[in-house]
Image (cartoon, helix red, strand yellow):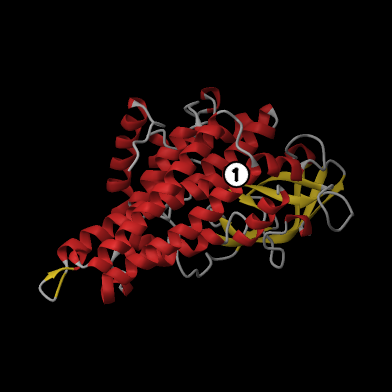
Protein backbone atom coordinates (compact mmCIF):
# COMPACT_ATOMS: atom_id res chain seq x y z
CA UNK A 1 0.00 0.00 0.00
CA UNK A 2 2.53 2.62 1.15
CA UNK A 3 6.04 2.57 -0.37
CA UNK A 4 8.79 1.54 2.00
CA UNK A 5 11.51 4.15 2.51
CA UNK A 6 13.66 2.23 4.96
CA UNK A 7 15.98 0.52 2.49
CA UNK A 8 18.37 1.78 -0.19
CA UNK A 9 20.15 0.16 -3.17
CA UNK A 10 22.76 -1.50 -0.93
CA UNK A 11 20.01 -3.21 1.04
CA UNK A 12 18.38 -4.52 -2.13
CA UNK A 13 21.70 -5.86 -3.40
CA UNK A 14 22.16 -7.64 -0.07
CA UNK A 15 18.57 -8.89 -0.27
CA UNK A 16 19.27 -10.55 -3.62
CA UNK A 17 22.26 -12.35 -2.11
CA UNK A 18 20.20 -13.57 0.83
CA UNK A 19 17.34 -14.66 -1.43
CA UNK A 20 19.67 -16.74 -3.61
CA UNK A 21 21.16 -18.34 -0.52
CA UNK A 22 17.73 -19.22 0.86
CA UNK A 23 16.54 -20.61 -2.47
CA UNK A 24 19.67 -22.69 -3.07
CA UNK A 25 20.91 -23.71 0.38
CA UNK A 26 17.84 -23.71 2.62
CA UNK A 27 14.52 -24.37 0.87
CA UNK A 28 15.52 -27.65 -0.86
CA UNK A 29 16.65 -29.20 2.45
CA UNK A 30 14.14 -27.78 4.89
CA UNK A 31 11.81 -30.77 4.93
CA UNK A 32 14.71 -33.11 5.74
CA UNK A 33 15.73 -30.78 8.56
CA UNK A 34 12.20 -30.87 9.91
CA UNK A 35 12.47 -34.64 10.15
CA UNK A 36 15.79 -34.52 12.02
CA UNK A 37 14.63 -31.47 14.03
CA UNK A 38 17.67 -29.33 13.36
CA UNK A 39 19.49 -27.88 10.38
CA UNK A 40 22.82 -29.26 9.23
CA UNK A 41 25.91 -27.66 10.72
CA UNK A 42 27.25 -27.20 7.21
CA UNK A 43 24.55 -24.58 6.59
CA UNK A 44 26.14 -22.34 9.20
CA UNK A 45 29.52 -22.54 7.48
CA UNK A 46 27.98 -21.70 4.12
CA UNK A 47 26.18 -18.72 5.63
CA UNK A 48 29.43 -17.58 7.20
CA UNK A 49 31.29 -17.81 3.90
CA UNK A 50 28.77 -15.42 2.33
CA UNK A 51 28.95 -12.99 5.24
CA UNK A 52 25.39 -13.65 6.39
CA UNK A 53 26.24 -14.14 10.06
CA UNK A 54 26.97 -11.51 12.72
CA UNK A 55 26.25 -8.67 10.32
CA UNK A 56 26.35 -5.90 12.91
CA UNK A 57 29.53 -7.08 14.62
CA UNK A 58 32.55 -4.81 13.89
CA UNK A 59 34.85 -5.90 11.10
CA UNK A 60 37.78 -6.39 13.47
CA UNK A 61 35.85 -9.27 15.03
CA UNK A 62 34.82 -10.85 11.73
CA UNK A 63 31.46 -9.17 11.13
CA UNK A 64 30.39 -6.75 8.41
CA UNK A 65 29.98 -3.78 10.74
CA UNK A 66 26.64 -2.77 9.18
CA UNK A 67 23.55 -1.59 11.05
CA UNK A 68 20.52 -3.62 12.06
CA UNK A 69 18.55 -2.76 8.95
CA UNK A 70 20.64 -5.40 7.15
CA UNK A 71 19.71 -7.92 9.81
CA UNK A 72 16.08 -7.06 9.13
CA UNK A 73 16.56 -7.76 5.41
CA UNK A 74 17.93 -11.21 6.20
CA UNK A 75 15.06 -11.95 8.59
CA UNK A 76 12.50 -10.86 6.00
CA UNK A 77 13.94 -13.05 3.28
CA UNK A 78 14.13 -16.02 5.61
CA UNK A 79 10.46 -15.50 6.47
CA UNK A 80 9.37 -15.01 2.85
CA UNK A 81 10.55 -18.52 2.00
CA UNK A 82 9.09 -20.07 5.17
CA UNK A 83 12.50 -21.11 6.52
CA UNK A 84 11.89 -21.33 10.26
CA UNK A 85 14.77 -23.77 10.78
CA UNK A 86 17.95 -21.66 10.73
CA UNK A 87 18.42 -19.89 14.06
CA UNK A 88 20.53 -17.14 12.54
CA UNK A 89 18.74 -14.34 14.40
CA UNK A 90 19.42 -15.75 17.85
CA UNK A 91 23.05 -16.46 16.93
CA UNK A 92 23.90 -13.20 15.16
CA UNK A 93 21.59 -10.59 16.65
CA UNK A 94 21.28 -11.78 20.23
CA UNK A 95 24.18 -13.99 21.38
CA UNK A 96 26.86 -12.15 19.40
CA UNK A 97 25.51 -8.83 20.69
CA UNK A 98 25.85 -9.91 24.31
CA UNK A 99 29.45 -10.94 23.73
CA UNK A 100 30.27 -7.82 21.72
CA UNK A 101 28.57 -5.39 24.12
CA UNK A 102 29.55 -6.91 27.46
CA UNK A 103 32.45 -9.30 26.85
CA UNK A 104 36.10 -8.82 27.58
CA UNK A 105 38.38 -8.20 24.63
CA UNK A 106 39.74 -11.74 24.88
CA UNK A 107 36.21 -13.15 24.76
CA UNK A 108 35.37 -11.08 21.69
CA UNK A 109 38.52 -12.17 19.89
CA UNK A 110 37.96 -15.81 20.78
CA UNK A 111 34.29 -16.19 19.88
CA UNK A 112 33.05 -13.50 17.50
CA UNK A 113 35.24 -14.41 14.47
CA UNK A 114 34.24 -18.05 14.83
CA UNK A 115 30.58 -17.12 15.12
CA UNK A 116 30.84 -14.87 12.04
CA UNK A 117 32.39 -17.68 10.00
CA UNK A 118 29.84 -20.27 11.17
CA UNK A 119 32.54 -22.34 12.84
CA UNK A 120 30.90 -21.78 16.26
CA UNK A 121 27.15 -21.61 16.95
CA UNK A 122 25.76 -19.54 19.80
CA UNK A 123 22.70 -19.86 22.04
CA UNK A 124 21.18 -17.82 24.88
CA UNK A 125 20.02 -19.89 27.85
CA UNK A 126 17.39 -17.97 29.81
CA UNK A 127 14.13 -19.91 30.22
CA UNK A 128 13.94 -22.64 32.85
CA UNK A 129 11.37 -25.35 33.54
CA UNK A 130 8.74 -23.71 35.74
CA UNK A 131 9.83 -20.09 35.20
CA UNK A 132 8.61 -19.28 31.68
CA UNK A 133 8.71 -15.54 31.09
CA UNK A 134 9.57 -14.77 34.73
CA UNK A 135 13.32 -14.20 34.55
CA UNK A 136 13.44 -13.06 38.16
CA UNK A 137 12.59 -16.61 39.26
CA UNK A 138 15.66 -18.16 37.64
CA UNK A 139 17.29 -20.78 39.86
CA UNK A 140 20.35 -21.90 37.89
CA UNK A 141 23.24 -21.06 40.20
CA UNK A 142 26.86 -20.11 39.68
CA UNK A 143 28.85 -20.42 42.92
CA UNK A 144 32.44 -19.25 43.25
CA UNK A 145 35.03 -21.91 44.01
CA UNK A 146 38.60 -20.72 43.81
CA UNK A 147 39.07 -19.05 40.43
CA UNK A 148 36.00 -20.78 38.97
CA UNK A 149 32.24 -20.68 38.97
CA UNK A 150 30.44 -23.98 39.55
CA UNK A 151 27.14 -23.96 37.68
CA UNK A 152 24.12 -26.14 38.46
CA UNK A 153 20.65 -26.04 36.94
CA UNK A 154 18.79 -26.53 33.67
CA UNK A 155 17.34 -24.48 30.83
CA UNK A 156 14.56 -25.31 28.39
CA UNK A 157 13.30 -24.16 24.95
CA UNK A 158 16.83 -23.08 23.95
CA UNK A 159 17.14 -22.18 20.26
CA UNK A 160 20.40 -23.46 18.75
CA UNK A 161 20.95 -25.38 21.97
CA UNK A 162 21.56 -28.79 20.41
CA UNK A 163 24.29 -27.58 18.02
CA UNK A 164 25.61 -24.73 20.16
CA UNK A 165 29.32 -24.38 20.85
CA UNK A 166 28.91 -21.44 23.22
CA UNK A 167 25.97 -20.51 25.43
CA UNK A 168 25.28 -17.26 27.25
CA UNK A 169 23.75 -18.64 30.44
CA UNK A 170 21.65 -16.56 32.83
CA UNK A 171 22.73 -17.61 36.33
CA UNK A 172 22.14 -16.53 39.89
CA UNK A 173 25.48 -15.51 41.38
CA UNK A 174 24.09 -14.58 44.81
CA UNK A 175 21.94 -16.27 47.41
CA UNK A 176 18.75 -14.19 47.20
CA UNK A 177 16.83 -17.07 45.61
CA UNK A 178 14.66 -14.71 43.55
CA UNK A 179 14.60 -11.20 42.14
CA UNK A 180 16.96 -9.56 39.69
CA UNK A 181 19.79 -8.14 41.78
CA UNK A 182 22.10 -11.18 41.64
CA UNK A 183 21.52 -12.40 38.07
CA UNK A 184 24.60 -12.60 35.86
CA UNK A 185 25.44 -13.67 32.31
CA UNK A 186 28.16 -16.29 32.04
CA UNK A 187 29.69 -17.86 28.94
CA UNK A 188 29.68 -21.65 29.01
CA UNK A 189 31.53 -23.62 26.35
CA UNK A 190 29.85 -26.78 25.07
CA UNK A 191 32.84 -29.00 25.85
CA UNK A 192 32.76 -28.23 29.60
CA UNK A 193 32.38 -31.34 31.74
CA UNK A 194 28.88 -31.60 33.18
CA UNK A 195 27.27 -29.55 30.38
CA UNK A 196 24.87 -31.84 28.53
CA UNK A 197 22.18 -31.36 25.90
CA UNK A 198 18.96 -33.29 25.50
CA UNK A 199 17.65 -34.31 22.09
CA UNK A 200 15.77 -31.61 20.15
CA UNK A 201 12.31 -31.04 21.57
CA UNK A 202 9.32 -32.47 19.71
CA UNK A 203 7.51 -29.26 18.85
CA UNK A 204 4.15 -28.65 17.16
CA UNK A 205 5.71 -26.30 14.61
CA UNK A 206 9.11 -24.86 13.68
CA UNK A 207 10.22 -28.47 13.49
CA UNK A 208 13.51 -27.74 11.70
CA UNK A 209 14.64 -25.27 14.35
CA UNK A 210 17.14 -26.70 16.82
CA UNK A 211 15.44 -26.30 20.22
CA UNK A 212 16.41 -28.36 23.24
CA UNK A 213 16.91 -28.56 27.00
CA UNK A 214 20.34 -27.90 28.55
CA UNK A 215 21.64 -29.34 31.80
CA UNK A 216 24.44 -28.06 34.03
CA UNK A 217 25.77 -30.48 36.63
CA UNK A 218 28.76 -29.09 38.55
CA UNK A 219 29.98 -27.32 35.42
CA UNK A 220 33.19 -25.44 36.14
CA UNK A 221 34.07 -22.32 34.16
CA UNK A 222 36.67 -19.65 34.99
CA UNK A 223 35.33 -16.49 36.62
CA UNK A 224 36.66 -14.61 33.61
CA UNK A 225 33.70 -16.10 31.65
CA UNK A 226 31.42 -13.62 33.42
CA UNK A 227 30.08 -11.05 30.95
CA UNK A 228 30.46 -7.48 32.16
CA UNK A 229 33.16 -8.30 34.74
CA UNK A 230 30.90 -7.38 37.69
CA UNK A 231 28.33 -9.79 39.14
CA UNK A 232 24.66 -8.90 39.36
CA UNK A 233 24.38 -6.93 36.13
CA UNK A 234 22.70 -9.69 34.17
CA UNK A 235 19.16 -8.35 34.41
CA UNK A 236 20.22 -4.87 33.27
CA UNK A 237 22.16 -6.41 30.39
CA UNK A 238 19.14 -8.45 29.36
CA UNK A 239 16.89 -5.41 29.46
CA UNK A 240 19.25 -3.48 27.20
CA UNK A 241 18.84 -6.09 24.46
CA UNK A 242 15.25 -7.25 25.00
CA UNK A 243 13.65 -4.41 23.01
CA UNK A 244 15.63 -5.46 19.92
CA UNK A 245 14.90 -9.13 20.56
CA UNK A 246 11.17 -8.43 20.64
CA UNK A 247 11.34 -6.30 17.52
CA UNK A 248 13.02 -9.25 15.79
CA UNK A 249 9.85 -11.26 16.46
CA UNK A 250 7.78 -8.42 15.02
CA UNK A 251 9.96 -8.25 11.89
CA UNK A 252 9.59 -12.00 11.39
CA UNK A 253 5.85 -11.83 12.05
CA UNK A 254 5.10 -9.15 9.46
CA UNK A 255 7.26 -10.78 6.80
CA UNK A 256 5.67 -14.17 7.50
CA UNK A 257 2.22 -12.61 7.19
CA UNK A 258 3.20 -11.07 3.85
CA UNK A 259 4.34 -14.49 2.66
CA UNK A 260 1.10 -16.10 3.86
CA UNK A 261 -0.98 -13.54 1.97
CA UNK A 262 1.07 -14.10 -1.20
CA UNK A 263 0.55 -17.88 -1.24
CA UNK A 264 -3.13 -17.45 -0.39
CA UNK A 265 -3.60 -15.01 -3.27
CA UNK A 266 -1.91 -17.43 -5.66
CA UNK A 267 -4.08 -20.32 -4.51
CA UNK A 268 -7.41 -18.47 -4.54
CA UNK A 269 -6.76 -17.10 -8.04
CA UNK A 270 -6.05 -20.58 -9.42
CA UNK A 271 -8.54 -22.70 -7.45
CA UNK A 272 -12.05 -22.77 -8.91
CA UNK A 273 -15.28 -23.44 -7.02
CA UNK A 274 -18.69 -23.47 -8.72
CA UNK A 275 -16.99 -22.50 -11.95
CA UNK A 276 -15.12 -19.43 -10.78
CA UNK A 277 -11.87 -18.69 -8.92
CA UNK A 278 -12.16 -18.62 -5.14
CA UNK A 279 -10.71 -15.09 -5.23
CA UNK A 280 -13.74 -13.85 -7.22
CA UNK A 281 -16.23 -14.51 -4.41
CA UNK A 282 -17.06 -11.43 -2.38
CA UNK A 283 -16.29 -13.16 0.91
CA UNK A 284 -12.85 -14.09 -0.38
CA UNK A 285 -12.13 -10.58 -1.64
CA UNK A 286 -13.20 -9.01 1.63
CA UNK A 287 -11.14 -11.49 3.65
CA UNK A 288 -8.08 -10.87 1.50
CA UNK A 289 -8.60 -7.13 1.80
CA UNK A 290 -8.73 -7.41 5.59
CA UNK A 291 -5.54 -9.49 5.60
CA UNK A 292 -3.74 -6.97 3.40
CA UNK A 293 -4.88 -4.05 5.54
CA UNK A 294 -3.72 -5.60 8.80
CA UNK A 295 -0.37 -6.49 7.31
CA UNK A 296 0.08 -2.95 5.98
CA UNK A 297 -0.63 -1.47 9.40
CA UNK A 298 1.87 -3.83 11.02
CA UNK A 299 4.48 -3.10 8.36
CA UNK A 300 4.35 0.67 8.91
CA UNK A 301 4.64 0.33 12.69
CA UNK A 302 7.49 -2.18 12.54
CA UNK A 303 9.42 -0.11 9.99
CA UNK A 304 9.06 2.91 12.26
CA UNK A 305 10.31 0.86 15.22
CA UNK A 306 13.30 -0.24 13.15
CA UNK A 307 14.08 3.41 12.41
CA UNK A 308 14.04 4.03 16.16
CA UNK A 309 16.39 1.07 16.68
CA UNK A 310 18.85 2.63 14.24
CA UNK A 311 18.70 5.84 16.32
CA UNK A 312 18.96 3.90 19.62
CA UNK A 313 15.56 5.27 20.66
CA UNK A 314 13.27 2.23 20.65
CA UNK A 315 11.47 1.96 24.00
CA UNK A 316 10.61 -1.27 25.79
CA UNK A 317 6.92 -0.37 25.52
CA UNK A 318 7.03 0.16 21.75
CA UNK A 319 8.93 -3.08 21.23
CA UNK A 320 6.43 -4.94 23.41
CA UNK A 321 3.53 -3.42 21.46
CA UNK A 322 5.13 -4.41 18.15
CA UNK A 323 5.70 -7.97 19.30
CA UNK A 324 2.21 -8.24 20.78
CA UNK A 325 0.25 -6.89 17.83
CA UNK A 326 2.21 -8.40 14.96
CA UNK A 327 2.39 -11.91 16.42
CA UNK A 328 -1.38 -11.83 17.00
CA UNK A 329 -1.93 -10.41 13.51
CA UNK A 330 0.18 -13.17 11.95
CA UNK A 331 -1.98 -15.82 13.58
CA UNK A 332 -5.12 -14.16 12.26
CA UNK A 333 -3.71 -13.90 8.76
CA UNK A 334 -2.51 -17.49 8.49
CA UNK A 335 -5.76 -18.78 9.96
CA UNK A 336 -7.73 -16.94 7.29
CA UNK A 337 -5.28 -18.25 4.72
CA UNK A 338 -5.91 -21.82 5.82
CA UNK A 339 -9.67 -21.24 5.58
CA UNK A 340 -9.41 -19.88 2.04
CA UNK A 341 -7.37 -22.93 1.03
CA UNK A 342 -10.16 -25.23 2.21
CA UNK A 343 -9.09 -28.82 2.89
CA UNK A 344 -5.72 -28.25 1.24
CA UNK A 345 -4.95 -25.65 3.87
CA UNK A 346 -4.72 -28.48 6.36
CA UNK A 347 -2.12 -30.40 4.32
CA UNK A 348 1.48 -29.84 5.37
CA UNK A 349 2.75 -29.93 1.80
CA UNK A 350 1.12 -26.52 1.37
CA UNK A 351 3.10 -23.53 2.70
CA UNK A 352 0.04 -22.06 4.41
CA UNK A 353 -0.35 -25.15 6.62
CA UNK A 354 3.29 -24.99 7.69
CA UNK A 355 2.92 -21.27 8.37
CA UNK A 356 -0.15 -22.04 10.48
CA UNK A 357 1.69 -24.41 12.83
CA UNK A 358 4.90 -22.34 12.83
CA UNK A 359 3.26 -19.00 13.61
CA UNK A 360 1.74 -19.93 16.96
CA UNK A 361 5.04 -19.83 18.83
CA UNK A 362 5.45 -16.11 18.20
CA UNK A 363 2.83 -15.30 20.82
CA UNK A 364 4.85 -17.26 23.39
CA UNK A 365 8.59 -16.87 22.93
CA UNK A 366 10.39 -13.60 23.64
CA UNK A 367 8.05 -13.20 26.60
CA UNK A 368 4.42 -14.26 26.29
CA UNK A 369 1.96 -11.74 24.92
CA UNK A 370 0.37 -11.53 28.35
CA UNK A 371 3.72 -10.27 29.64
CA UNK A 372 3.84 -7.80 26.74
CA UNK A 373 0.49 -6.39 27.89
CA UNK A 374 1.84 -6.05 31.43
CA UNK A 375 4.89 -4.14 30.18
CA UNK A 376 2.73 -1.82 28.10
CA UNK A 377 0.32 -1.29 31.01
CA UNK A 378 3.17 -0.13 33.25
CA UNK A 379 3.70 2.86 30.97
CA UNK A 380 0.08 4.04 31.23
26 or 370, nearer to the observer = 370
Looking at the figure, which quarter contains the N terminus? top left
Q: Residue furthest left?
A: 275
Residue 92, above or below 123: above
Whether residue 206 is visible here, answered yes or no, is: no
Q: In x, y percent, where is residue 340?
A: 28, 69
Query: What residue is rendered at 10% in x and 73% in y?
Result: 275
**Residue highlighted by disc 1:** 318
In-image side of 40 versus 362 (left or right): left
44 above or below 211? above
Image point 69% across, 34% down: which residue?
Answer: 102
In this rendering, would 312 be left or right of 278?
right
Q: Position of residue 117 (x, y in %)?
A: 47, 36
- Residue appearing at x 38%, y 41% in the figure: 46
Q: Position of residue 249 (x, y in %)?
A: 51, 50
- Circle 1 SS class: helix
Which class describes the residues within 10 Å of circle 1: few (<14), some (14-19), or many (20+)?
many
Which residue occupies 56% across, 55% down?
324
Amino acid sequence: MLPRTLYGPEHEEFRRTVRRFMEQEVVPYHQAWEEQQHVDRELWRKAGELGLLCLTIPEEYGGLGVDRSFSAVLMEEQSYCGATGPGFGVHSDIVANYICNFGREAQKLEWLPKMASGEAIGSIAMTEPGTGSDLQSIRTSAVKDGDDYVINGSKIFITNGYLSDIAVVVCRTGDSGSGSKDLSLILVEAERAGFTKAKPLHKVGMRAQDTCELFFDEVRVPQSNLLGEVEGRGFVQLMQELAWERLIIAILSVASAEAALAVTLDYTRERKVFGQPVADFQNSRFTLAQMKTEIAMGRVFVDRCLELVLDNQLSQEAAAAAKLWTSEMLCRVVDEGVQLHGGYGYMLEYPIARAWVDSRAGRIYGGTNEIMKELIARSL
